[in-house]
Structure formats: C-alpha cells, structure tokens
Image (spheres, rainbow, N blue to C red):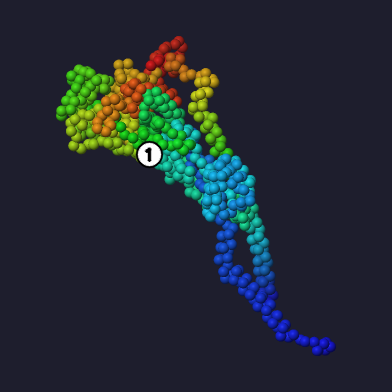
Amino acid sequence: MKTNTNKPQFQLRRMVVLAVFMLLVVGLLYRALDMQVINQTFFKQQGDARHLRIVPLTAHRGDIYDRNGEPLAISTPVDSVWANPKELQVGADPAKKLAQILDLNQVQLQNKLNKLSDKEFVYIQRQVSPDTGEQVKSLGLAGVYLQREYKRFYPTGEVTSHVLGFADIDDRGQEGLELAYDDWLRGEPGAKKIMRDRLGQVIDDVERIRPAEPGRPVHLSIDRRIQYLAYRALKSSVKEHKAIAGSAVVLNVHTGEVLAMVNQPSFNANNRSQLRPGVYRNRAVTDVFEPGSTMKPFTIAAALESGKWHPMDNVHTSPGYYSVQGSAIKDMRDYGKINLSEIILKSSNVGISKVALSLEQETQLDMYIRLGFGVDTGSGFPGERNGNLRSQRLSDFERATMAFGYSLSVTPLQLARAYAAIANGGTVYPVSFLRQDGDIQGDTVMSADTARKIRRMMERVVSAEGTAQKAAIANYSVAGKTGTVHKFISGGYADDRYLSVFAGMAPASDPQLVMVVMLDEPRNGEYFGGQVAAPVFSKVMSGALRLLDIQPDNLQYVRRPGNATVTKGKSA
Amino acid sequence: MKLQLTLLSGLVLAVVLSAVAVVYSKHQSRKSFVELQALYQQIDELDIEWGRLQLEQSTWSSHGRIEEIARKKLNMTLPKANDILYITDED
C-alpha cells in the first residue's frame, strides 16, 4: 500500500466532514432528547390540543308523568347542526346542500356564514330530527358537525300547559312546574374526549371522562283524564259566555293533591312562537280575586264553632238592607226572618253580616286565617300569590263585607283548599302537585260536626230551591256555593262586570273531590255563578267521579226479584 | 456468578412477559372500548326509538282524538243517568 504516496491525503478535510456529521448527530440527539424527555409534556399537550377535544355530553332531562304514569313532558334525542366557518370549504358549496336538507333559505344561510366567517362556532339549525341529522352527516362536509341534544315535548299540549310551564331550548325550566322542580329534573352534563383528523372531522371517541347524569323523573298528582275534562269544559264555557279568562281546580280532599288545574286562555307549550306575555300565567295560583259569596260558608263555620250559633237560629234581614257605619249592605230582596241554613241557601249579605258582627273580630278572622287565606298553600308553584287578608284594625263595615267575600282576596287554589277542609271534616292540608303516597299531616280548623252541618246547608244550594241547580250531578249528591262578584276596577266596584264563581264538592255524603270554577267577566248576558260556573263543575265532576270509580250516593232504588238489588239511576 | 445469571435471565423473562401482557391488555381495552362505543350507540338509538314511540302513542291516544272517533266514527254516546244500572250486593 505504498504505491500512491503521492496522492493527497485530505486529512484535514476528512476530519472536518466527520466533525460536521458528529455535530449533526449530536444536534439530532439533543433534539430527540428535548422532545422526548425534557419538554415532553409540552409537546404532547400541543399535539393533543391539535387533535383531541373534550366535548360536553348533554344530559337527559327527567320526564314528567301524571299520577297514573302517563307522560306529560318527555325529552327525546335530537341533533343540532353547527358549523365551524373557518373549516368550511367553499368549493363544496355547503350552504346550498345544507339549505336543501334543512329546508332553510340558502341566501340567508350563506350570508350568515359569510358574516360569521371569523368565528369558530355557528348554529346552522337547532333540534332537527335524528333522521335529518343522519342525512347531514352523510354529506361529509368538512366543518359541519352534529351535536346531540334533547327536545322537550308536551304530548298533552294546551291541556296541561299552565301547570307544567315549559323548558327553554337549552332544557332549563322557565315556567310552572318545569321551573319549580328544575333542580330535580335537570341532569348533570358529562364530558367525553374525541379525536379529530387534520380537517377537524371527528374520527374516534377516545374516552368518556364522565358520563352524563340523567335528570330524575317527576310523578305529578295531576290525573290526565280529569285534567282533560276540566280543560274541555272550561274552554267551552269561556267561549260560550265570552269571558275574558277562567280557572278551574280539582283537589283530592283527603290529601291536598291537585288532580286538575286549568286556565283559559291557554297556549300550546310545544309551539311558543306566538306567545303573548301573560298568556302562560297559571291564573289559578298567580291571580287573586275577591271570592264573594263563596266566602259565606267559612263565616258560618266561625259562627258555629263559636258556640253562639246553631243552624236553625234566626236572623232578621228585613228590609233587605243593613246600614253599618253609614254604608249600606244590600240583599237582592227582602228575605225576612231566615236561619243560618237559609242565609247560605239564599246567599243573604245582610244575614251573614249580622252573624259576623255578632262574633268577636278574632273569632271571625281566626277562622279565615286557619283556613289558609292570606298565606300560600305550600304548593311551591313559582309565582304563587298569598292573597290579601288584613286582620288588624278592621272597621265593622270591613268585617261585615269580609263575611260575604269582599275586602279580601284569594287565589282559586286557596279557595279550593279551604272548601276541601269543609269536605273532609275540618282539616286543612298542604296543597301538593306531586303524587302523595304516605299519610299527610294537616291542621284541624273546625270540628267534623261543624263541617257536616255546613255541607248540609250547601247541599240545599244545589237542590231545586237553591241558586246552583246546574251544578247537580245525576246519581250523586253535591254540596256547593255560588258566587257572583262585582269586579273591583280602578275607583270602585263595577256595576256591570262580574266574576262568576262556583265552589263545590261531591259526593256530599262523603266528599272525595272539591272543585272551584271561576270565570272572569262573562259578557254574554248570563253572569250568575249558578248559570256560568256551576255547569262547568257538573260536567267535570260527573266525569271525574266516574273515572275514579267513586260510588254513587244518591240512587233511586228499584227492587227486582232474586238476591241482587238492582239500582236504577235517576236523572238529576 | 451462576446465581446472578439466573436472576438476570429470570428478570429478562419477566420483563418480556409483562411487555406482552401490556400489549395484550391494551388490546383488550381497545376491544372493550369499541364494544362500549357500540353499546352507547345502541342506547342512543333505543332512546330515539323510545322517544318516538312515546310521542306516537300519546298522539294516537290523545283524549281529543279518542273522543272524536268515539262520537263521530263509532257513534258512541255517554249513557244517560237512567240508562245505567248499578248492581249491588244486598247487605
């Protein structure tokens, strides 16, 4: 190997080249070390941030059922279509394709996307059916995504709208029981990690960080069937009598459960686009009115409980008016000498005023207070009003007018609860919109004997001699009281504007249900409570008694040969 | 020396085995995850179906519709009070 000694050795050049290679290797090694060890967390984070995303999982809102398990509000899965305008590819013409499937205006959609082109999140269409969602997905458009959401449906629509209220598009309770039990109904959203490709399309679910916690169902005390009867009867009555508004409440007298509660005018909770403010108010709970003559039985209750009065005690009502502190209290006509029972039967203002003024102020007012007037019913309904019951420094005239239901105001629900006390033998129960299964504690406010005597008096009101024959129900006995109330408008009581009220219970021998019906300003000629409100009571109550299988207590017996007694119904 | 060698080869074997076990369990976990995804998917589909059926049922069984059919199509009426016979045990 000595032949080429003349050849140049390039020793230096070789060293330089080698050194350069060495440096490169060291550099690479350092970079590798840097990425893999020293700054590993940082790079991993950056990488993940580019293709891993945490997305929320919408939780299912609890369903609402009636007392028999029929659905009143259910949440079903739907898809919301959204887009990231930055990722949209103009060439694919997304606006045109989406507009076609989603039935949107293409130009408007395009304008919207253009306007928001620097944003990263735009809803294209919320809450489309899963089928439509599938079609959108199959377009395979870059930057267009689906989001699972739940849409609230109210199968009974208008019939239950005031009681249920509604939840908004983000599943938050806004009104009514949806609002009252929102914490219970609402679920806890979960989260999951997804993997996306370079274009941002979701490739894979990586892991569930936490599953969505579904909301819990609610079982209401409402009976859907009775609710429907009440809705239908009230609606047709409001229409027939051209009333401004109306409310009806049916309570179970032994538990304080609300079996039905309806108002007119109503609205459809599934389609609230034409919602006028105020139309969603649950008037039976949020509006107060002066109860008028429907208050008289409670004044009688105070009188009987005081021990000073007995049902057959007489009161002189001649000459048909009575002057208290210079103000006159008037009757329809001169009833002469009548007893307590006849005061209820004929609805004598003079009679009841004299009875009330014979009592201590406290005796009279205590009865009203213990019956729950002036305080809420414990129902927990959002926006419930307490009504107005003053109990301090009352003049005799005010006290007398209270005896027949003026100078104080109540909600239809409060009135129903107080009537329930007469119906069940003297106990006031807290009102509940939830199905009650256990024993319920109430306050005893009058003796069972007093309650029974008042029911007897009120049975006469519904008989042929009374003011509310139209409240009668075939085969059942009914007890109740009518009210025709002059409306209080600015400046005083209107002569020609009325509230028509009926409060009643059935079967009178052992009441199970009480119902209050109130129509605001019937303007079609008839306005007496017995003409306008009583027929609604009869229609709803007869159906409810049949549906709940409550035994008739007022049958005409017809004996047939053999062992069985055949009982034939008689018409009312 | 012999002891050390045995120990070493034992440890090497253990490392190899645990590596294989890691691969296996990772594979299992992927498989289970895919299965889980499929089941979630199924829950979702069943939920959709359930909601649809509930709505359908409540539409068909709405009181208004039943009443309409009963009255108009089937010519049914509520029995009048004196058309009803109540049969009771004599007691």
Q: Which chain does tag 1 point to? A: A
Instruction: State which quarter of the image contains the C terminus of chain A.
Output: top left
Q: Nearer the viewer, residue A279 or A416?
A: A279
Q: Secondary structure at mark 1?
A: loop
Relative side of A94 to A167, left or right: right
Q: Is residue A386 above or below residue A142?
A: above
**Residue A462 position within the rendered picture, expressed as x and y whole percent measured from the top left:** 33, 20
**Residue A427 position within the rendered picture, expressed as x and y whole percent measured from the top left:** 31, 32
Q: Is residue B74 above or below residue A207?
A: above
**Residue A478 position within the rendered picture, expressed as x and y whole percent measured from the top left:** 35, 22
Q: Quadrant of residue B42?
A: top right
* Farthest top residue in view: A561
Residue at which label 1 appears: A381
Q: Nearer the viewer, residue B21 or A203?
A: A203
Which residue corresponds to the image point at 38% horizontal and 37% vertical from the top-left?
A278
Which residue corresponds to the image point at 38% horizontal and 35% vertical from the top-left?
A282
Relative side of A395 to A32, left or right: left
**For the residue marked with disc 1, what is the amino acid?**
Phe
Counting other residues with Cα less than 10 Å from the Cα at mark 1, is it few (<14), some (14-19), or many (20 or more)? many
Residue A455 appears in view: no
Q: Quadrant of residue A510?
A: top left
* Farthest right residue in view: A3
Relative side of A446 to A570, left or right: left
**Residue A119 position within the rendered picture, expressed as x and y whole percent measured from the top left:** 52, 54
Q: Nearer the viewer, residue B62 or A255?
A: B62
